[in-house]
Image: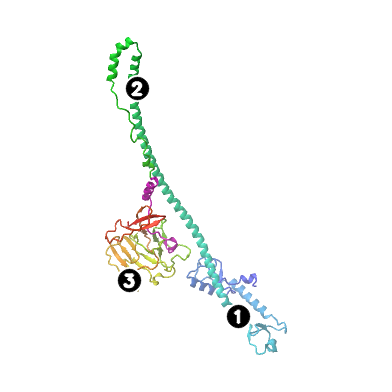
């Protein structure tokens, strides 16, 4: 085992005693050749130990350390030369290759080592060091892989915390907005109830006032007549004619009838209240057909908080997870398609570089995607609209587009991939899909590419087992039911926007 002082004299890169040591600005020392090879391999001037960038491409020699190393080697050689044979008390100057042991000159001539091969100690030591170094190299490389994996795990852990924090913030923000919509709708409905209550109470108050006046008038007439009835006969007869005229002149009113619709229209306020609120919520909800997957985005791409737009920026420090593109500035949609009809609109605006299309699920995320020849693309390259057909040996087509495109509608079905502007066909790939495909976007522009929201017409029907499909060949697709999805026993008719 090496002593503490010997460990301090070993280069961190080659793990051997320093040879021509140089001193970096961060105070770490390395063999001159070791640090130069390291910099050439990493294409950077960072220190192999602390990763700080060196201020000088040719660091100065560390003369003090060089002198210590030379003194140590001289002392070690002296100790080696002083080793004596236990049998003959002579210096061990040879190495028996057959017995793999140090011997002296007398041992060499002894019967024990007859016809054996011998090497000088320094040559044998050098050969064995090289052999040991070969065995050590795979372990060192494996150690580097594990250290790199550990660094990536540390970075992934940090990214998980960042993603959790940002996602929690977005969830709270969205629920706060929806809560605000619900609170506003609640106030509107309570205000409508309060208004109806006030109006109907006012009507009832007026009705009661009218009844009180009629009751008071009738009560006075009846009271006067009853007083006449209680009078003496002579007095009654004297006043009878006048009392009778008063009663006959008092017109009889129609019988009072209850007011129709006087009560609160509870059904208007409570009937299907949840459904009515849901319909109101639909106006406040933004629905996007394609949601971008941030875990697949190249480190030079940045996504919006709602995961619907992407733009280019300086490279970020992100974990190298298997789902992430590492060489091409691509990002995938979060959900893939294997069947059915799918459509989404991307606003490219004034972006000078963009690519749209779909990618197969088996597409490799690492390395140069251009060499895989598996992408169906349309894009803007150096001011020219082009498309690539992989089925025709990556033949590039220049599209006959005369104006600047602002919005592109991408349409995917089982047999083809089409691009529109946004209703006029630009290009169609007659390409059947045998595996799941994912929407993808690529850009190297700081201007964002945005997936526009959609508003599909969704209707809920009563449960049944009927299968409905529209096989009409009508050219007008507006409002056409494409298919029914059965979820929890209910059929949902999905209409094209």
User: Of callouts 2 and 1, which one flags the residue occurring earlier in the amino acid sequence?
Assistant: 1
Task: Report the residue marked by disc 1.
Answer: 128
Task: Report the residue marked by disc 3.
Answer: 396
Instruction: Classify mark 2: residues with Cα within 10 Å, few (<14), some (14-19) or many (20+).
Output: few
* Vertical placement of residue 293 versus 206, above or below: below
Q: Real-space Cα distance between discs 3 and 2?
A: 99 Å
Which residue of the protein is positioned furthest toward the front in this rendering?
233
x and y percentages locating residue 179 in the rendered image = 42, 47
Secondary structure type for disc 1: helix
Q: Is residue 277 magenta?
A: yes
x and y percentages locating residue 323 in the rendered image = 45, 65
User: Of callouts 3 and 2, which one flags the residue occurring earlier in the amino acid sequence?
Assistant: 2
Q: Residue at x 40, y 69 (%)?
A: 369
Left or right relative to 123: residue 334: left
Q: Which residues are magenta?
A: 272-301
Q: Residue at x 56, y 68 (%)?
A: 28
Regarding residue 110, the answer to whether it shows in the image is: no
Left or right relative to 87: residue 136: left
Q: Mark 3 or 2, which is nearer the eye?
A: 2
Task: Report the residue marked by disc 2.
Answer: 216
Secondary structure type for disc 2: helix
């Amino acid at each position: 085992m090496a002593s503490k002082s010997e460990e301090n004299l070993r280069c961190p890169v080659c793990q051997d005693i320093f040879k021509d040591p140089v001193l970096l600005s961060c105070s770490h020392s390395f063999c001159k050749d070791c640090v130069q090879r390291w910099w050439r391999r990493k294409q950077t001037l960072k220190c192999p130990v602390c990763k700080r960038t060196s201020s000088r491409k040719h660091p100065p020699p560390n003369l003090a350390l060089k002198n210590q190393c030379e003194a140590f080697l001289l002392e070690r050689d002296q100790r080696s030369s002083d080793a004596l044979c236990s049998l003959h008390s002579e210096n061990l100057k040879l190495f028996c290759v057959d017995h793999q042991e140090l011997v002296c000159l007398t041992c060499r001539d002894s019967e024990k080592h007859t016809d054996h091969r011998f090497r000088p100690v320094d040559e044998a030591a050098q050969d064995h060091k090289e052999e040991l170094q070969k065995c050590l190299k795979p372990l060192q490389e494996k150690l580097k892989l594990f250290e790199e994996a550990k660094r990536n795990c540390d970075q992934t852990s940090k990214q998980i915390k960042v993603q959790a924090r940002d996602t929690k913030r977005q969830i709270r923000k969205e629920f706060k907005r929806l809560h605000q919509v619900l609170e506003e709708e609640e106030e509107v409905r309570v205000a409508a109830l309060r208004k109806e209550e006030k109006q109907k109470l006012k009507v009832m108050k007026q009705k009661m006032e009218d009844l009180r006046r009629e009751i008071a008038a009738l009560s006075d007439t009846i009271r006067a007549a009853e007083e006449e009835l209680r009078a003496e006969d002579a007095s009654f007869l004297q006043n009878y004619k006048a009392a009778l005229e008063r009663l006959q002149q008092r017109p009889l009113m129609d019988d009072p009838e209850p007011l129709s619709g006087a009560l609160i229209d509870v059904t208007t306020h409570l009937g299907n209240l949840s459904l009515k609120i849901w319909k109101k919520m639909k106006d406040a909800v933004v629905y996007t057909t394609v949601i971008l997957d941030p875990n697949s985005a190249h480190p030079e791409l940045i996504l919006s908080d709602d995961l619907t737009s992407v733009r280019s920026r300086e490279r970020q420090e992100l974990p190298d997870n298997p789902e992430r593109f590492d060489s091409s500035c691509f990002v995938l949609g979060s959900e893939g398609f294997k069947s059915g009809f799918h459509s989404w609109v991307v606003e490219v605006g004034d972006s000078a570089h963009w690519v749209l299309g779909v990618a197969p699920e088996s597409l490799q995320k690492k390395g140069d995607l251009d060499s895989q020849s598996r992408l169906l693309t349309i894009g803007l390259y150096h001011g020219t609209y082009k498309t690539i057909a992989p089925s025709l040996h990556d033949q590039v087509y220049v599209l006959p587009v005369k104006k600047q495109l602002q919005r592109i509608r991408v349409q995917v079905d089982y047999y083809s991939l089409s691009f529109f502007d946004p209703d006029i066909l630009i290009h169609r790939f007659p390409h059947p899909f045998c595996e799941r495909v994912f929407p993808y976007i690529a850009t190297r522009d700081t201007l964002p590419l945005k997936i526009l929201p959609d508003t599909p017409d969704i209707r809920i029907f009563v449960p049944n087992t009927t299968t409905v499909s529209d096989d009409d060949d009508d050219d007008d697709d507006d409002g056409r039911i494409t298919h029914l999805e059965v979820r929890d026993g209910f059929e949902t008719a999905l209409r094209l926007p």
